[in-house]
Amino acid sequence: MLGWFQKHRRKRYLKQPWPDSWSGFLKRNVRLVQGLSDNEMEALQGRIKIFIAEKFWEGCRGLELTEEMKVTIAAQASLMLLGVDDFYFDNVKTILVYPQSFRRQSDSGWLIDEEHRSGEAWQGGPIVLSWRDVVYGGRHRGDGRNLVIHEFAHALDGLDGEMGGNVSFEDEAIMERWKMVVSSDYHALLLAVRQGRHTFLDPYAATNLAEFFAVTSEMYFEEPYQLSQHHAELFDLLQAYYRVNPTAWQHTATQAD
Ligand SMILES: [Zn+2]
């Protein structure tokens, strides 16, 4: 249950005007929103305003955070929320932004960034993003990659208490179907990757079930039509989960090119 104060605060954020410059940031950096209808864009703008206001933002390694950075990140995360009401990744309080891919010190010493170390999602902790990769993911469509969606999918996955690749559905039958379809598609991918065969999904999805959910979520928003062709059942389940159908946006955005 949302507290009265939080609801009140969110209403106040919604009433704030939407700056013209923010539309410019979206146009320049977030290709995914280009296919949205006017109503969807209005809903997205509201979510972006609340998202930006409620998070604690911090630039790391000398990066000075700008409005453009906040809007670009918030827009891609908020796109994932268009199908739900009154949820703004409440489990993520802090967003740390590095200028580019980062190293971090762990118990075992310095870790060199591998492919997905351009971002991190911590259970109960911050989302960490490389600005350079945020922009790359936002501006390029058609490669199935989107760093912000990837990391925030991990955050959604963590809502049940662990980032294990299992997400919740109210309907138990859908929940069961999710487990079956994910298990079957994941193991087929694992086998194909081990045999060195070409796969539609990025082989990184075969790392574990958490990465499988994060990578398929990226595909769901970036390449929805292609995902529906290659993984029809999984696509349907992701649609039941996100409660939006991005194929309409993809079509419109492609037409607009
Ligand atoms: Zn990941």
Image: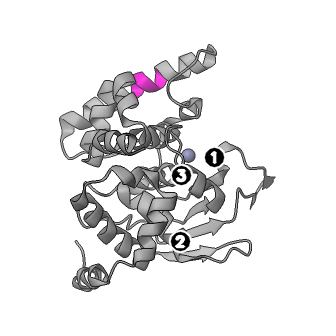
Mark linked to residue 68:
2
| Quadrant (top left/top right/bottom left/bottom right) for the N terminus | bottom left
What kind of residue is marked 1? His
Relative depth, front residue between 203 and 249: 249
Q: Which residues are magenta?
A: 182-187
Which sits in the foreground, 167 or 226?
226
Residue 135 at least partly seen: yes
Within 8 Å: ligand 1 and the Cβ of disc 1? yes
Query: Picture quarter containing residue 5?
Result: bottom left
Relative to 13, is 138 on the left or the right? right
Question: Residue 121 in the image: x percent, y percent?
Answer: 54, 57
**Element class at badge 2:** helix
Amino acid marked by disc 2: Glu
* Residue type beneath disc 3: Arg
SS of the residue at dot 1? helix
- Measuring from the top left, give residue 91's x and y in whole percent: 41, 65
Q: Which residue is mark 3?
A: 139
Label of residue 116 in the image: 1
Camera-nearest label, 2 or 1: 2
Q: Is residue 257 above or below residue 50?
A: above
Q: Tell me if residue 174 is in the magenta stretch.
A: no
